[in-house]
Image (spheres, helix red, strand yellow):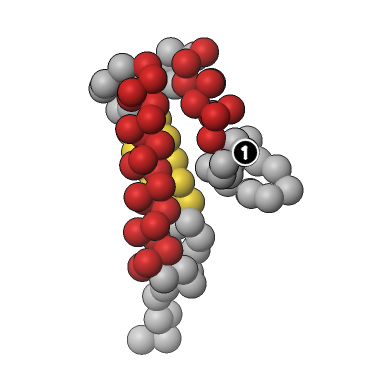
C-alpha cells in the first residue's frame, strides 16, 4: 500500500501510527513490519533513526496485542555504493 507521500507503504508518522496500531489489534495475522528509509544516498544516521523508530513501534504493538506478535522486522533501503570502483 502506498500513497502520494510514500512509494513503499504507509508512513509511520504521528497521524498514521495509531491507525497502523489499530490494524494490528484488528487483524491477528499481521505479524511483520517493514521500514524503507531510502536507497543509495541516505546516511547511516538516517538508517539508524528509521530502525529506532520501527523498534519503538514494535514495542507499542507488542504492548497492545502481546509479546512475540511481531515475527519479522525488515529494514529496507540501501547504503551508498561506489559503482566505479
Q: Is residue 4 left or right of residue 12?
A: right
Quadrant of the image occupied by residue 71? top left
**Image location of residue 69, percent across then percent down:** 32, 21
- Quadrant location of the C terminus? bottom left
- Quadrant location of the N terminus? top right
Q: Is residue 84 left or right of residue 70?
A: right
Callout 1: helix, strand or loop? loop
75 shown above or below 70: below
Asked whether residue 79 appears in the rendered view, the answer is: no
62 shown above or below 49: above
**Image location of residue 15, percent across then percent down:** 62, 38
38 and 55: which is toward the camera: 55
Residue at the location (73% across, 48% down)? 4
40 and 65: which is toward the camera: 65
Residue at the location (53% across, 21% down)? 22
73 and 83: which is toward the camera: 73
Residue at mark 1: 15
Quadrant of the image occupied by residue 56? top left
Residue at the location (48% across, 51% down)? 36
Q: Is residue 71 left or right of residue 3?
A: left
Amino acid at each position: 500500500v502506498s500513497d502520494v507521500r510514500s512509494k513503499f507503504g504507509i508512513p509511520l508518522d504521528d497521524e498514521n501510527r495509531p491507525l497502523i496500531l489499530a490494524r494490528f489489534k484488528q487483524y491477528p495475522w499481521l505479524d511483520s513490519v517493514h521500514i524503507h528509509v531510502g536507497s543509495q544516498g541516505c546516511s547511516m544516521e538516517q538508517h539508524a533513526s528509521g530502525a529506532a523508530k520501527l523498534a519503538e513501534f514494535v514495542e507499542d504493538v507488542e504492548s497492545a496485542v502481546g509479546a512475540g506478535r511481531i515475527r519479522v522486522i525488515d529494514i529496507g533501503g540501501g547504503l551508498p555504493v561506489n559503482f566505479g570502483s
